[in-house]
Image (cartoon, rainbow, N blue to C red):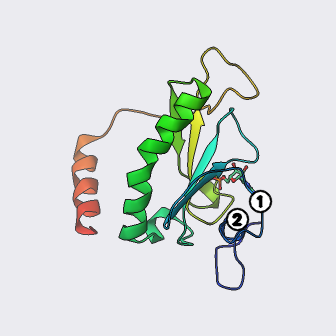
C-alpha cells in the first residue's frame, strides 16, 4: 500500500527528482519535471510532475500549479510530434480509490494510437454517465462555489 509523501518517506518521484533513481527525462525546469512512465500504456506515455512534493492536486501551491499548467501544452505537443499521435488523454489521479499509486502529483500524458487494440493502445475509459438532475445540480454548484 503506497504511503503519502512526507519528509521521512520520500515517494519514488521525489527520489527521481533528487537523482537517486534514474528516469527517461524529457523536460526539466526549476518547478517541473517530465519523464517517461516506466509501465506505459502507449508508446510515449509521459508523466509531468511538480518539483513540489504535494501528494494530491488539491494540496499543490498556486505557483507549482501555474508552472505545471504553463508547460503542459508544450510537452503535449512534443509527445504528439514524437509519437505521430494526434489524439491523447491527460489523466490525473488523486487518492487510492481513484487509482493513485504514487502520492506525488503527476499528470499522465497518454497518446491514443489510431486503430490500436489491447496492449499499448492507450487509456480505456469507463464513463458511467446519466443525465443531470438540474434542481440538485443548482444546489451542488452553489455549495461548491461557497468553498472557493
Ligand atoms: P498513478 O496510478 O496515477 O499514481 O500512476 C503512477 C504511475 O507512475 C504509474 O503509471 C507507474 O507506471 C509510474 N511509475 C512508478 N514508478 C515509476 C518510475 N520509477 N519511473 C517512471 N514511472 C513510474
Q: Quadrant of the C terminus?
A: bottom left
Q: Quadrant of the N terminus?
A: bottom right
Between 18 and 92, the one lying in front of the other is 18
Q: Residue drawn 67% across and 64% down?
A: 13
Q: Secondary structure at mark 1?
A: loop
Locate residue 43: give its quadrant: top right
Q: Residues within 10 Å of mark 1 (few under 14, many from 20)?
A: few
Q: Residue drawn 61% across and 22% down?
A: 113
Locate residue 73: give its quadrant: top left
Could you tell me how far apart the alpha carbons at marks 1 and 2 are, in whole angstroms?
6 Å
Image spot of residue 55 (x, y percent): 57, 69
Note whether 91 is above or below 66 in the view shown: above
For disc 2, does the CB lie below 8 Å from ligand 1? yes
Q: Secondary structure at mark 2?
A: helix
Residue extending farthest bottom: 8
Q: Residues within 10 Å of mark 2 (few under 14, many from 20)?
A: some
Amino acid at each position: 500500500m503506497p504511503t503519502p509523501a512526507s519528509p521521512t518517506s520520500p515517494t519514488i518521484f521525489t527520489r527521481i527528482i533528487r537523482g537517486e533513481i534514474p528516469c527517461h527525462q524529457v523536460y526539466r525546469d526549476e518547478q517541473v519535471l517530465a519523464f517517461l512512465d516506466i509501465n506505459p500504456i502507449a508508446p510515449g506515455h509521459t508523466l509531468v510532475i511538480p518539483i513540489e512534493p504535494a501528494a494530491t492536486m488539491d494540496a499543490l501551491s498556486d505557483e507549482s500549479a501555474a508552472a505545471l499548467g504553463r508547460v503542459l501544452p508544450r510537452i503535449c505537443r512534443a509527445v504528439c510530434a514524437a509519437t505521430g499521435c494526434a489524439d491523447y488523454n491527460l489523466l490525473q489521479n488523486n487518492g487510492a480509490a481513484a487509482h493513485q499509486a504514487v502520492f506525488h502529483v503527476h499528470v499522465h500524458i497518454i497518446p491514443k494510437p489510431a486503430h490500436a487494440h489491447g496492449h499499448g493502445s492507450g487509456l480505456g475509459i469507463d464513463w458511467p454517465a446519466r443525465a443531470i438532475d438540474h434542481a440538485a445540480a443548482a444546489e451542488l454548484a452553489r455549495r461548491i462555489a461557497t468553498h472557493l
